[in-house]
Amino acid sequence: MSKPEINKCLYPIFLSCIILGLFIFSFLSTAFSNQEGVTKQYKKAVQKMDRAGQVNAETQVPKNIVRVLDEDQGGHFFTEARKSEIKRFRCSSCHNDKMVSIQGAADLSHADIKVVHGGKEKPLSCNTCHSTEDRDFLTTGKDTRIDPDHVYQMCGQCHFRQKKDWIGGAHGKRIIFWSGERVVMNCTSCHNPHSPRFAERWPKTYSVPLK
Amino acid sequence: MDSKKKNTISRRAFLTGAVSAAVTGGALVTTGCKGKNLLESSEAFALEFQEYFKKHYRLMNEMEREKTVSRLERLSKQKQGITVDIDTTGPLENVLYGYAFNVTRCEGYMECVAACVRENNLDRRSNMQYIRIFEMEHGQMSPDQGDGKYFHMVPREGHFYMGVQCFHCDNPPCVKACPTKATWREPDGIVVVDYDWCIGCRYCMAACPYYGRRFNWNQPEIPKEEITKKQHYLGNRKRVRGMMEKCTFCIQRSRKGKLTACVEACPTGARVFGNLLDPDSEIRFVLENKKVYRLKEDLGTDPKFWYFID
């Protein structure tokens, strides 16, 4: 007589136990699963990589670099030096008070340089960037001197958004290593300062059609 | 009687002569044409035989890995005459590789594709490429609307370029599809293939929503002088016909702290590669300061490859 009554009592308790168990199981499985997403994973990470430390013996700092005067998110970083790349630097070896012989003037003049910079309405001229007083330096509008190695300071005056990205790492590119000391390309490593836009050309290779 | 004897003798003589001639001739043939090769290739044969019985890469211990690497290096020396350096560098501590692609900057020069082919010893005969660059009109978002086989002067007015390769998903569908566990996600986030464990069923190719995997339809053919000699067991070492391969974020380079070949080759700086777990890295700057998106994010594959806009 009493058996069915107990069964009737136990039935809802049993059912609720199962539901509770399932609930706990699903909660635990979500809490302990590794599938938390890469976004969460990197946002949690705070441990910085040691820039001075090397990943292995192959990681070396490239030569011919200068320390950038600005700082990025991880402290100081380096960029490619410019002066040693310019064939006839120092400029003041010709641009001085002394007389210049006419021989070889065609080679020594800068007639081959075409300035395509600054748009049609307000094109740049030589002296927009090059200093007239101190020939070995670039100049800003405020009559300050800029070393050609730190040419990013010059470009960054108009292209300040690009400079901000360049300091952070969204513009320009790093040299050889993703680890170790951060060495990035200078503005002039990729852009010709006299005509900074990339030229139209044929692609290096081609892809085979998929279908 | 005499003639009969003569006959039998002559027949016997003929038979023995024929047999001995056949034996010596055969021996001559084998020694003359094959013998030298056989002697030379017996070591290669033994090495190849031993290669059949090696374990899955993840189940091998250090010693077994060293052994198989030395076997593979010796085989390459024997068969192609090239001294290669195969390493088995493991993942770095506290590193998760991430990649960002600037769709505004890419001009479609395809320098990255050429560099990738060269670095990863891809098959030149079938023209296999890991990277595909799509030329897309402004306003298009998905590469399936783009032109993946353009060949004209670039950049073209009113178009932008979008590179697609293996996205190294954090939740990779290809790994789940593999019936032999020949592909897996390394602790540093790179999805790799054990080429010797792959059976070439191409399930992973079907499972990948990004067309990130490639199949070797023929024995890869690479000009001898163009082979990259710095190799990794899971990366650009010699592959065979009938197995899968894919982009490995240039595992042989990235684990040594170097940039991948595509990043290094990019003439416009549209490609950013780095450690996601380092708050100072460039990739983290991009993710935190730029407008980024991922391809087919709704599938939940969680790729570690972001596109961003200047």
Image: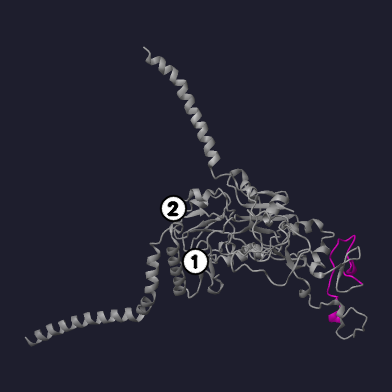
What amino acid does circle 2 point to? Answer: Thr
Mark on residue B238?
1
Q: Position of residue A200 (x, y in %)?
A: 74, 64
Mark on residue A143?
none
- Colouring: one colour
Q: Earlier in the sequence, mark 1 or mark 2?
A: 2
Q: Chain of mark 1?
A: B
Q: Report helix, strand or loop for mark 1.
A: loop
Q: Report helix, strand or loop for mark 2.
A: loop
Q: Is residue A114 left or right of residue B172?
A: right
Residue A110 to residue A4: above or below? below
Please report the residue visible at 60 percent of the width from the left and 69 percent of the height from the top: A58
Q: Position of residue B171 (x, y in %)?
A: 55, 48
**Is residue B36 highlighted in magenta?**
no
Question: Within the image, what quadrant is residue B128 found in?
Answer: bottom right
Residue at mark 1 shares a chain with residue at mark 2: yes
- How would you rate the neighbour count of disc 1 (Cα within 10 Å): few for under 14, some for 14-19, many for 20 or more? many
Quarter of the figure with the N terminus of chain A: top left
Magenta: main secondary structure equals: loop
Q: Nearer the viewer, residue A83 or B262?
A: A83
Residue at the disc numbered 2: B180
**Is residue A123 highlighted in magenta?**
yes
Residue A15 to residue B294: above or below? above
Where are the magenta residues, as a range?
A106-132
Q: Position of residue B306 (x, y in %)?
A: 65, 52
